Amino acid sequence: MKLGVYVFATDLDLDPGPLAREIEDRGLDSMFFPEHSHIPVGRQTDYPDSYGGGELPDFYKRTYDPFVSCSFAAAATTRLQVGTGIALLALRDAVHTAKLVASVDRLSGGRFAFGVGFGWNRDEFATHGVDWTTRHRKVREQVELMRTMWTDDVASYDGELVSLPPSWCWPKPVQTPGPPVYLGGSGPLTMKHAAAWADVWYPTPPVHDPHLTESIPRFRALVEEAGRDPDTVPVGVAPGSCDDADLEAYRANGVAHVNVALVAPTADQMLTQLDELVARRERVLGR
């Protein structure tokens, strides 16, 4: 089981490059970055209970672009997996994003993971002029389009919501047929989408099933119903916190990748959290 962190990297934190070196030096496996282009002041969308509920944390307002963060983190390290965790793909242009993904993967030597999600903050969609009700279908089509750009010398795609005329696009990613696509979200619709087309299902564990004890068997059944081998579609999780018992439960339930939130008010406290995570890994995973 891989173990790493996700970081709401902001202008007030230790920068992504130096922090990535600290993470790699401690032998952790990965560093993912969430995305929010902006947060409208006149918010109408409640902060989801699955993410903690209540007041929206200040770091949501200050995040760096995740692809820029991934680039700095990859440049500062040699083996650390970097990724978006998750990118709000429906709010992005698929063609430009395909180029970003391929570029980061190529320049990092194939160390990029492409986490995508459907989004929870309806206010952002209004600003970008994106239809909230079609976001699930749009993200699926965007990923299909991007995969053609990563693999075909002349790529094209004709979908209901996105399309691409026959086009050239390089570079191609190092990883073939492209970086793994992690689909974030714990709801039943997201689970169904992940079973049908994602490379990894990547939920934040829901309150009613914190270790995915019930969810993983349901997910594997959905994967099989979609005509895929459940053993080829792993599950990752992105918990806000994780103690020894949590980590052991994830391993027992067959989780392949755990990225724990790294959130602290100072750089020193972030490093302390990293040391605590390493100690937990040694106690539970023996490495």
Image (cartoon, rainbow, N blue to C red):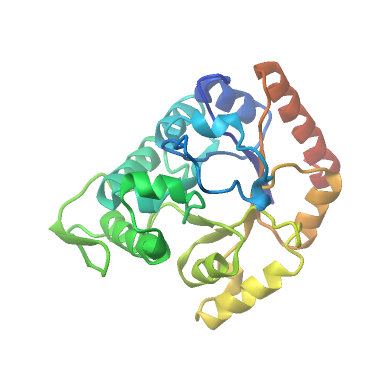
Please provide percent x and percent y for residue 126. 37, 49
The residue under the point 74% across, 28% down is 273
Q: Nearer the viewer, residue 89 or 4?
A: 89
- Up/down of 211 relative to 218, above or below: above
**Residue 70, image quadrant:** top left
The residue under the point 62% across, 50% down is 48
Quadrant of the image containing the C terminus? top right
Please provide percent x and percent y for residue 242. 77, 43
User: Is 131 displayed left or right of 168 in the figure?
Assistant: right
Q: Nearer the viewer, residue 150 or 47?
A: 47
- Up/down of 93 relative to 273, above or below: below
- Up/down of 280 relative to 13, above or below: below
Q: Is residue 245 visible?
A: yes
Q: Nearer the viewer, residue 56 or 171?
A: 56
Please provide percent x and percent y for residue 281. 78, 40
**Residue 60, image quadrant:** top right
Q: Is residue 78 visible?
A: no
- Give the mark count: 0
The residue under the point 31% across, 50% down is 129
User: Is 227 displayed left or right of 57 in the figure?
Assistant: left
User: Is 114 displayed left or right of 53 in the figure?
Assistant: left
The residue under the point 52% across, 25% down is 10
Please provide percent x and percent y for residue 276. 79, 31
